[in-house]
Structures are given as C-alpha cells and as structure tokens.
Image (cartoon, rainbow, N blue to C red):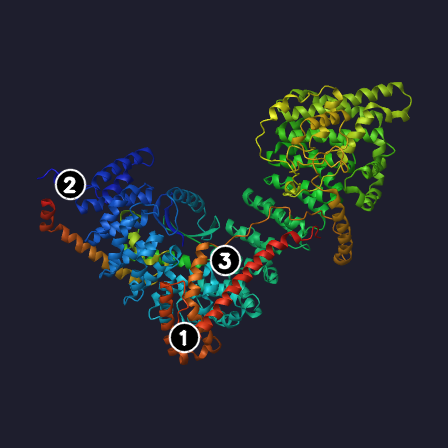
Amino acid sequence: MSGGGGPSLMDSLFQRTLDDLIKGIRLHLPGAPQSSFISKSLDEIRREIKSTDLQTKSTALQKLTYLHSLHGIDMSWAAFHAVELTSSPSFLHKKTGYLAASLSFRPSTDVLLLLTNQLRKDLSSTNQHEVSLALECLSVICTPDFARDLTPDIFVLLTSSKSFIRKKSIACLLMVFSQYPDAVRVCFKRLVENLESGDSAQTLAATVSVFCELASKEPRSYLPLAPEFYRILVESRNNWVLIKVLKIFAQLAKLEPRLAKKVVEPICDHIKRSEAKSLVFECVRTIVSSFHEYEFAVKLAVAKIREFLLDSDLNLRYLGLQGLLLVAPNHLWAVLENKEVVIKSLSDVDRNIKLEALRLVMSMVSDDNVVEICRVLIGYALKSDPEFCNEILRSILSTCSRNVYEIIIDFDWYVSLLAEMARIPHCQNGEEIEYQLIDIGMRVKDVRPELVRVGRGLLIDPALLGNPFIHRILSAAAWVSGEYVQFSRNPFEIMEALLQPRTNLLPPSIRSVYIHSTFKVLSFCLHSFLFPKKEVNSLLSDNDIEPGFTYSESEQEFTETDQATSSSAFQKRDTFTQESIDNVLTLVITSLTPLVENHDVEIQERVRNVLGLAQLAQKDISSHHDQKEKMVDKMDLKVSIIIRLINDALSEDFGPIPFNAQERVPIPDGLVLEENLSKLDSICADVPLPKSESFSLLKPINLPTDGDSISNQHNEEESETSAAESMSLLAEHRKKHGLFYLSSNDNKNASSSFPPANDPSQRDNDMEDLVKLTEESLVLKRKPNLSRPRPVVVKLDEGDRLPIIVKKTDENDDLISGAVRDVLLGNETSLHSNNPSGRRKGKTSSKDKVENSETSNSSKRRSKHRNHGNNVDKKEEISEKSKQKSGGRHRARRRADGDIDVAVQKPVIPDFLL
Amino acid sequence: IHFVLSISRQGKVRLTKWYSPYSQKERSKVIRELSGMILTRGPKLCNFVEWRGFKVVYKRYAGLYFCMCINQEDNELEILEIIQYFVETLNRYFGNVCELDLIFHFHKTYYILDEILIAGELQESSQNTVHRLIDAQDSLVEAAKEEENTVSYIIAQVAN
C-alpha cells in the first residue's frame, strides 16, 4: 500500500458519517461540550476533505454543510472542495457539491470563477437533473460575472422541450436580470414568448412570477404586455398565477387609468367565484389599493373585508383589518361602517391584531372626533398590558402632533390629556410628552394659562416624583411653570412644589431645571412685590421697548385674557405682601442652601445664582422694612434695579426654532470657518476673571436661559440687560480679537454679536401675515358649534422636522427597465395596434408573429451594435420607433421636471399655515 | 420570499435557506430575533408577524415552526399555503415526517425545498411532480452509490 493511499483509505473506512455527526451533536449538551465536539469534528472534516477519495470528500463536505447551515460554522475555506465536487461524474457528489455551493457561496468567494465552466457544462448537460442542479445553484449565487458568462446558455434553455427545465431557467432569469441588466436584451423576447405560449402551467407560473417581481420594481416598462396579462387573468384557473397577475395589474393600473376599467370586472368575478381565501384577499387588496374609484368594486371588496373581520380565523381578521387600513385613505366610510369591530379588536388576544386595530382607529381620527377617540383609547390604555398601553399612547401623541397639531382645536383639552397620560402608571413616553408640552407652550399662546394649571397639578403631586418614567414630563412642567409664571394663580404654591424635599429623587439634569424655574418664579414674585402698580401691564409696557416681536401684535388677545383673569390678578396683587415674600425668601434659602455643595456642576451653579439673588433681596427688603418708611421708594433699592433687569430678560418670549436656523445666519465676509484655532490659547489666557459680585449675579442672564437642552433651543437672543461692566469687557475683547467675532449689527440689538435666530424684521412681516391669516381663518373656518376659535399655532417656514430626502430609484432597476423598454419597443408598436381591438386578436396574431420575429432580429442586432441601432430597413418601424423614443424621452424629461418642481416648491410653501 | 427558516420549539434551527444576501452575522441575528418573536407567541394567534418592515409568515407543525419572510405587499395567505404544501410534500416523502427526519436528512429537505422554490419564487405547485423528480434524483444517487460500492471501483480507488 502506498504512503499516500493509506491514510485516505483509513479515512474512508473509518469516517464518521453524517448520521454519526448528528447523533454526536445531539448527545452532547448544548454549550461548551457541544461546541468542543463540533470543533473536534471540524478538525476531522478538515483532514477528510483533502482526501483524494471522492466519497470521503463528499461525506466530509456534507457534514460541513450541515454544520454551516444549522450551526452557523464558517465554511468559506472549503469553497474549493465544493467546486471540485461539482465536477465529479457521480451525481451524488455533484449534488453534494452544488448544495454546499448554493448554501455557502458569496459574491466575495474567491473560487467563484472556477465554477463558471462547470456550471456551463452542466447547463448544457443531457441529464435534466444535472441541468436543474446547476440552475438552482445559479439562482442563489448569481453574480454579475456569472450572469454575463452564462446568459447564452440560459437563453438556449428557455426553449427547452422539458417544461421542468424551462420553468427553472425562467425563474433563474430573475436573478440574472438583476445582476446583469444587459441580459434583458438577449432573453426578454423568449420570456415574452413563454408568457404567450402558455403550453405548460408551470412555465406560465414561473414567467408570471418573474414579471411580477420585475414590475414591482419598475412597472412602466411592462405596460405593453397588459393584453397578455389580461388574457391570463380571464382564462387562468390557477390561483398562484392569478395572484401574481393581480399584483402586476395593481402596479400597471396606477400608470394607465384606462386599464382599470377593463380589469375591474374580471377581478370582481374572481371575488364572487373563488373559494380560495388567498385569491379573494388578493383581489380585495388590488381593488382597494389601485381601483378605489370604482364604487361597486370597492363596495364588494368592503363586504368581503367585513366577512373576514367577522370570521373566527385570526388570520382573516388580521388581514381584514389590513384591508380596511388600505381602504381608509380613500373611503373612510368603510372604516366607520366597521367601527365596532375595529374597536372590539383593540382588546383582542393577539397583539398584532390589536396593533392593526390601533392603526385603523388612528386613521379615523379627524378634528371632529379626536376628543372622543382619545377618550376611548385612554380607556383601553388603562386596561391593556404595559407594552400595548404605550403603543396606544405613542400613536395618540404622534397622531395629534401631526403637522403641528393640525387636528387639535381645543388645546386646553389636549394639554390636560397630556397630563392625564403622564398619570397612567405604565406611561413610558415621557420624552415625547415633555417635548409636546414645551412645544405647545411656545407655539400656542392662548393655552398657556391652562398649561400652567396643568403643570401645577403635576408638580404638586409628590407621588409622581417616585416614577422615573415621568421625570421628563415633570421637567417640562417645571419649565412651563417657571416660564409662564405670570399666569399662575399662586406662584408661592409653585415655589413650594419646586422645592419640595422629594425633588431629590430627580436626576441632576431635571433638578437643575427645577432650580432654574425657582429662579424665574422668585424673580417674578419679587418683581410683583416691588412694582405692584405696574403689575399686569408691566409685561406689556416693558416689551414695547424690546426689539422683540411677541407682544406687540398680540395685545388684543392679551387684554382678553387679562380681563378673563383680572379677578385672579387682583387677588395676586394682594398676596404679595411683605410677609409672604419674606416667607418665600426664607423657603428658598433654607431648601437650597444644602445644595450649594452638590456634586453636579449644573445644579451647583444654578443654586448659587438663586441664592445670590435671594440673599440680596432678603437683606435689602428686610433692611428696608426695618426703616418702615418711604414705602414708595421701593423702586430705588438696589435689588429693585436688578430684579427689573432680570425680569425684563426673562419675560422675553421663546419662539420655536427651526432645525435649519443656524444655516440662515449669514456668514460674514472674511470669516474663515474650520480654520485651525491655534491662536485660541493666547486669547483664553487674557480673559479676565469675573471679580465683582454683581457680575456673577447677572450671569444667568447671559446664559442661554434653558441651556440644558430641555427644549432644543440654544441660540436665544441675548438680552439687552447685560451689565455695562461685562459689556465693556466684551468690547475690549472684541477690539483685541476682532477676527473671531461676527460683525455686530448695532442698530438692532446693541449687545448681541450674533444675528438673532428669529430675525425681527422678517418676523414682523410674518406676523402681519399671521394676523391676516387668523382673520381669514376666523371668517372661513369657524365652525358654528365651536364656542371659541382654534388658537393660533405658530409654525415655521420650511417645516419643523428635517426635510425628507426623496429616494432615488435603484440604478440597477433603471438599467433593467431601460433594457426592457428597448426590447419592447418593436413589440410595443405591434401591441399598440392591437390594443383597441383586443378581441379581434386572433386575426392579427399571425401578422404579429411575423413582426415579432423581425423585431427579435432587430433587437439582436441592436445588442450587437447598440450605438447605431437604427439600422433597421423597415421605414415604418423606424418612424414608429422614433416616435416611441421621443415619447420615452419626453416622459423622462417630464419626470425630471417633476423633480425640479418638487425642489422648487418646497421653499415656496407659505410660512404660516392655519 | 427572502428566506425560509425552520425552528424547533426549543429555538434550535432545523433549516435555513436564504434567497436574499445576508452575511453570516446578519443571519444569526435574524434567527435570534425571529425565534424570540415567534416562539413566544401563543398557540392560537394569527400567523403573521411584522418584522423590520417585512412580514414573516409562520406556521407551527408539532414542535416545529416554519417561517418565511416576505415583502409587505406580498400575499400572506399564499405563503401560508406554500408552507402547508412544503410540509405536505415532506410528509409524503418521508412518510409521516417528524423533526428527526429533517435533522438526519437535512440535505434531502433542501432538495425538496429546491424543487418547490427557486430564487424565492414558487416553481412547482404539484406534489406529484415534485415527488417524481425527487424520486428520479434519488434513483440517480442510488445508482451512483452502487457503482461506487462495486468491487472493481474500490480496487480502482486503492490502486490510485
């Protein structure tokens, strides 16, 4: 026995079979023992697979394939052996080799090219099973190279006399086309022939499947084949084929409305006649998605959907709901008709059904019924499991906030709904609710009193602080209460709520919001105390001086609300007594002093700000109180001046800021961005440190007022009230390092070195528009049964969310469809002449055939010299073709125009929509 | 159809066939996600699951779940029928098929699947045809085996 043959024979005699391997794996426990067994087997396989004995090799590869497909073992190293086995004369080995190849090969496998020849050989084999193996393998691992090299072989197989081979080669074309669009020029003709001949049900099914897949990517090219599909739709009794044809028509009908008229009848026939639920459902889906303007068809479809909905089979119920969802956009009545079923499905056992039902319910929402639907949904949310409960809340939130709260009319209701959601035990949508609360606060002026009331309710409930899910909501409530404290009936109460001991349960970031709100409330209280006469009007008068925008236009509205709350305002004035202010100051100081040494920098800094103000105020006021004289001169106190400044700063209104605000800031000439800031060190070195106390006291004003990202705003306008001291420092600095500053526009905002994000001049225009629009909307849109008009919702131009980028179609698809169109050009002409006389087809069919063969010739020729493909001798055809081509080009141009249109239109969208 | 999976109730994979390109990493992730999603569903729920913008149609036979992943707009009921048809074919081939059959004859399962689906499309809707084809292939395999087992063949091998 030779040295080389010995181990090979030993291996083949004592080789573990596949069964042994599987049994071994099953014997070993999952986990470490099993994986060690597998790695031991892998070592064996590595040895065995190198054997010269094909049987041994084949078994080894089979074992490896098993491990690969079910245990995810890498087998790319064995690719060569798989290729080797495919070339074995034995069918068994060939089969094993192909199975391994089809399961494990990737486009990146390096021995892929070695397989090309073998595939070609097998594709032209006389043994049909070998051909089928090769086709199956190719259909999985097809790459552009394979497709290019093997297209001629597949082309031959397309006319194979064995339908078994033909159908496989047809299905294989799908992969070939997608990898190598040029193959379309060669094979498409024969594909169409297969569609027309229909001598075997299986080939027809395969062909239709291929067209269905192709059409789903780019339907337009296949319009000329519509008559063929129509014939199949009417004649075929094969449900599989019918489903695919319906899918094709669903695509085509969107492009060619005349088609719908013809097709809708047979589809309805199928619905009425067919027993197969899958076919019926497909008909229904086709009708509701593509033929929704045919009333009778839709009625029939909806009736079927209703049957599905009432069926005991959950699958049908699910599909019924899906069908309704498709109908909903065009025929809301269908949903309303089945309202009870849908609502009932909300409490179905199956989560998926519940979800579908929820989507449906949300599709029913309009501004008329939003209140009612939300009430029902909240009821369900309370009853459901946490997961679904949150799903409900999420969809309510997203539906209601759609298009800047389009469907909300009564914002007071909506705000209290948000608060109610916060109190649902499982609520995990804190972030979104937080965002909406603040967003509404900024956008909708009229709702602020209610917002403050709601915020108060949330803040003073100590139980809520224990639930980490709603901390974010509390943060919003705190911010709202601080920002709009002037609407509060009792600021002291809010102060107490903000400072309650349980706030130590909050995370630092939210706690600092609390503390900052304390600051706002405190300054408001002091302001009201120190300037009692101007109290209500102070806001207005102060803001007239401001270059800002908010109050000037809304004075009327404001006086309205003022009158409404005038009584409470008077009460309020009474509450700001010496005693109460003293109490507040003591409360602030006692509860915040321990926080001075908090580990969180943010908290520490803010606490110091508040304490600085409070202590100053306490000292001044109490000393003033001791003198018990010159009450009138309160205004002269040092604290009064500061409070006034602070209050002015705080009463500045926030507006919503679009995402692209930064981009609108013009870049001044000579400013070089992204340059290396090497000089920065030298500049930072001579930044003077703050010295005086008053400077640090005023610091919070210079800070972005809500810098902790609670509301996405960072480029807040700087207030006018910067201390003169800091101004001078700044000016000095600017003089020194002017290069790094933006040019200031002094005329507008003395201290601001940045152009404001909300450009005042533009604002004014917008406001005029807004006022005009409001008037219009009041006249036109006011509903008779509404007690009051929908409040103004501030919107931004260019959308609040980021613009959606239009998806481009896959280049590859374009290539395919382009090729298809080229091939069909001749075909199209003949079919077009057919089209009006679809019934008389038999007469012209012979002529068709002649034409077809000719065009197939020409298409072949064109594939040879594609550059001057017009070498066709028939003049007719040339003229027709050019017509077609120009048509195609026109279409393309139109599409391009459309794109530009979209691009142009976007910025033109009116700034304020109501 | 993007892929076909068969998972046992214990979460063991019994069959995987991918018609769309997925890397090995993605494959195991997909299997993990789906088995987590499908195995936890109760017995009398609907057979469709939405997953990453696709739909997964599954059906349970004894302890084995057969899953197929399809596009959103494909027909779920049709896929359900394909699964049924696949399982019936297996049943007929193995004679009262059980999980062990699929484990020990995994390659045969693949061959049957390959006769039913190609490139993610149904290619043969007649059980008889599939059966005939598989039988024909089996007999070819048997012939090859017999040839190998002949004495002359072994001697030729040894001589090499």
| Chain of the residue on which disc 3 is drawn | A
Q: Nearer the viewer, residue B60 or A125?
A: A125
Instruction: Tell me which label, 1 or 2, sits earlier in the chain.
Output: 2
Quadrant of the frame with the N terminus of chain A:
top left
User: For residue A698, what is the image quadrant?
Assistant: top right
Q: CA distance from mark 3 to mark 1?
A: 53 Å
Contact between marks 1 and 2 (CB within 8 A): the answer is: no
Instruction: Tell me which label, 3 or 1, sits earlier in the chain.
Output: 3
Query: Is residue A254 shown to the viewer in this render?
Result: no
Instruction: Tell me which label, 3 or 2, sits earlier in the chain.
Output: 2
Q: Nearer the viewer, residue A515 or A344?
A: A515
How crowded is the residue under tag 3: few (<14 C-alpha within 10 Å), some, or many (20+)? Answer: many
Residue A92, percent across and down?
Answer: 21, 52
How crowded is the residue under tag 2: few (<14 C-alpha within 10 Å), some, or many (20+)? Answer: many
Q: CA distance from mark 3 to mark 2?
A: 59 Å
| Chain of the residue on which disc 1 is drawn | A
Contact between marks 3 and 2 (CB within 8 A): the answer is: no
- Residue A894 versus residue A699 in the image, above or below: below
Residue B98, percent across and down?
Answer: 31, 50
Circle on res. A874: 1
Location of mark 2 (residue): A8
Q: Which SS class for mark 2? A: helix
- Do the residues marked 1 and 2 share a common chain? yes
How crowded is the residue under tag 1: few (<14 C-alpha within 10 Å), some, or many (20+)? Answer: few
Location of mark 3 (residue): A319
